Amino acid sequence: MSKLPMARLDRLLANLGYGSRREVHALVRKGAVIFDGAAVSDGGLKVPVVADLPSRMTIEGAPVDPPAPLTLLMHKPLGVVCSHREPGRSVYELLPRRWRARTPGLSTIGRLDLDTTGLLLITDDGPLLHRVISPRSHVAKRYVASLARPLRGDEGELFAAGTLMLESETEPLAPAVLEPLSPTKARLTITEGRYHQVRRMFAAVGNHVEALHRDQIGGLTLPDALGPGEWRILTLEEQAAIFA
């Protein structure tokens, strides 16, 4: 039987962004940390770092934040960026403020640009992040593109051929699947993640993407009930669905 991973309370809560170790000890002294129904009196207490910790511990009356590894599913809204360094409002500002101080830090799995909406994954799980974005995984991403001009009719064949070259690229794109939805709207599934790839693909055939929305990664689909700017924790079953 494997042993449960354990951590000192002060180190764990500091890594979850609740403050420095000194600040965590102050929370303990005022009785703000409750574990298994009793107030914690020792900041050095060893506690299990397990997924159900929020059901066993509260901080100032609220369930403790989930420990790592943590993966979130977000419906990215229009007008926010996916980087800590780009100017403008970021997706991280849609999360609890203290989460920006978590260790390990949260990162997006790939990016959606400022003008693209839809399914975004955010995680502190390095192996999961690299598995999703690795070219060897061939995880498909599906987008709905609203176009400035009607489809010509030959885009599906051209995108599927695996011969399309984008401007300034030296390797052709992998085959992609186009599904027309209307004269000026199409669903496009790709297995790569090149810079602004979907927009550049339509530009290569003389069109312009006016709106772009990602609704699926692998076998994981953006839930209809999750509105723009909303997020929730991804379950293990949903993580597995990415690679199904």
Image (cartoon, rainbow, N blue to C red):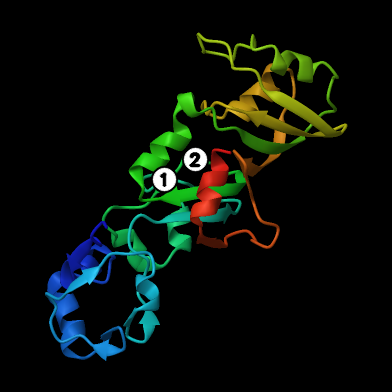
Q: Is residue 146 above or below residue 18?
A: above
Q: In this view, does 116 lie above or below 91?
A: above
Q: In this view, does 141 lie above or below 84?
A: above
Neighbor class of circle 2 (other Cα within 10 Å; few <14, some 14-19, many 20+) is: some
- Identify the residue under disc 1: 83
Q: Where is residue 62 in the image (x, y as percent from the top left)?
A: 39, 82
Q: Where is residue 240 in the image (x, y as percent from the top left)?
A: 52, 45
Q: Residue at x 24, y 62 (%)?
A: 15
Where is the C terminus found, in terms of image quarters? top right
Q: Quadrant of residue 152?
A: top right
Q: Which of 18 and 204 is in front in this view?
A: 18
Neighbor class of circle 1 (other Cα within 10 Å; few <14, some 14-19, many 20+) is: some
Q: Is residue 211 above or below residue 4?
A: above
Question: What number is the disc on residue 111?
Answer: 2
Q: In which quarter of the image is residue 97?
A: bottom left
Q: Which of 71 and 7 is in front in this view?
A: 7
Is residue 113 in sight in this rendering? no
Q: Mark 2 to mark 1: distance in Å?
A: 8 Å
**Left of 216 or right of it: where is 83?**
left
Q: Residue at x 74, y 24 (%)?
A: 207
For discs 2 and 1, the disc positioned in front in the rendered view: 2
* Residue type (three-letter) at the residue carrying disc 2: Arg
* Residue type (three-letter) at the residue carrying disc 1: Ser
2 or 1: tag closer to the N-terminus: 1
Q: Residue at x 88, y 31 (%)?
A: 183
Where is the N terminus found, in terms of image quarters? bottom left
Is residue 231 in sight in this rendering? yes
Q: Position of residue 53 (x, y in %)?
A: 34, 71
Look at the numbered discs 2 and 1 and tell me whether their residues touch, using CB distance below 8 Å. yes
Tell me the SS state at disc 2. loop
